[in-house]
Image (tube, grey):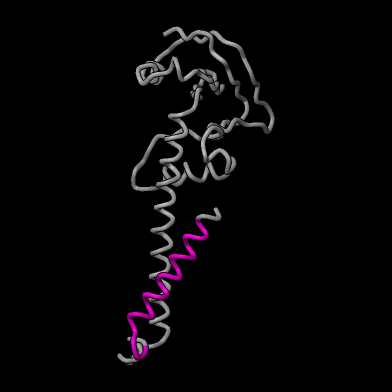
Amino acid sequence: MVEQQEAEKAAADSAAKAQKRQRPGGSAAKRAGGKPEDDLAAIMEGLMQQAQDTQNEMGTRLVQRMVDDIAQVPVHDLLLRTKEGLHAVLTVSSEFYSSATNEYLRAGEFRVVGKVTRVVTGDKSINLTRRTVLGVAGPDIAKEMIDSVKNDAVQLDVADPIVEAPAIQILPMAIFL
């Protein structure tokens, strides 16, 4: 957040300097007989655009960092839903997890033999982004980030990164396809 605020401040300073360079001898609005409010509106519009560009760039860097974090972790969390609606988070070893395994698990029926390591009840939850840079920011930021991806022009079917109760976390010993 501090990095984003610093970038936005730098963008605002840069826009203000650019506006000053564009108006030697007074503002274009004054020379053209325009209103100072029009000049201020143009400056504000430029600042808003630069802030939006900076925010988009930071979002892209954050997503890239998350991808890198996920690639480096020794375990992956897989979110599954039982027919009864119970959420199950499988914490699988990266050593045995491949893209082929992911495809088998994506749309199939299988059995998992393992140890239940956590039962989520009441107001407890599991943050699926906890092993990434986004997980450090907390569950609200994770939800906001995923929601922003869902609302943009590209529509992705992305699960909520915060798994609410009722849910269980399982350390699988075997997965039978």
Residue 103: x percent and y percent? 36, 19
Near-viewer residue (16 or 153): 16
Location of the C terminus (image quadrant): top left
Q: Is residue 161 above or below residue 55?
A: above
Query: Looking at the image, which is closer to me, 45 or 17?
Result: 17
Tell me, yes or no, whether the highlighted magenta stretch contains residue 33.
no
| Magenta residues, dominant SS class | helix
- Residue at left offset 32%, top offset 86%: 28
Seen as rendered, the residue at the extreme left is 32
Query: Is residue 134 something that shows in the picture?
Result: yes
Examine the structure image and report whether residue 18 is included in the region drawn in magenta: yes
Whether residue 79 is visible: no
At 42% from the left and 58% from the top, the residue drawn is 54
Please state the extent of the stretch shown in magenta in the rendering: 4-26
* Residue at position x 56%, y 34% in the image: 130
Q: Is residue 134 above or below residue 94?
A: below
Residue at position x 52%, y 59% in the image: 5
* Residue 90 in the image: above or below residue 68: above
Q: Position of residue 27 (x, y in %)?
A: 36, 87
Q: Position of residue 30 (x, y in %)?
A: 36, 91
Q: Residue furthest right?
A: 122
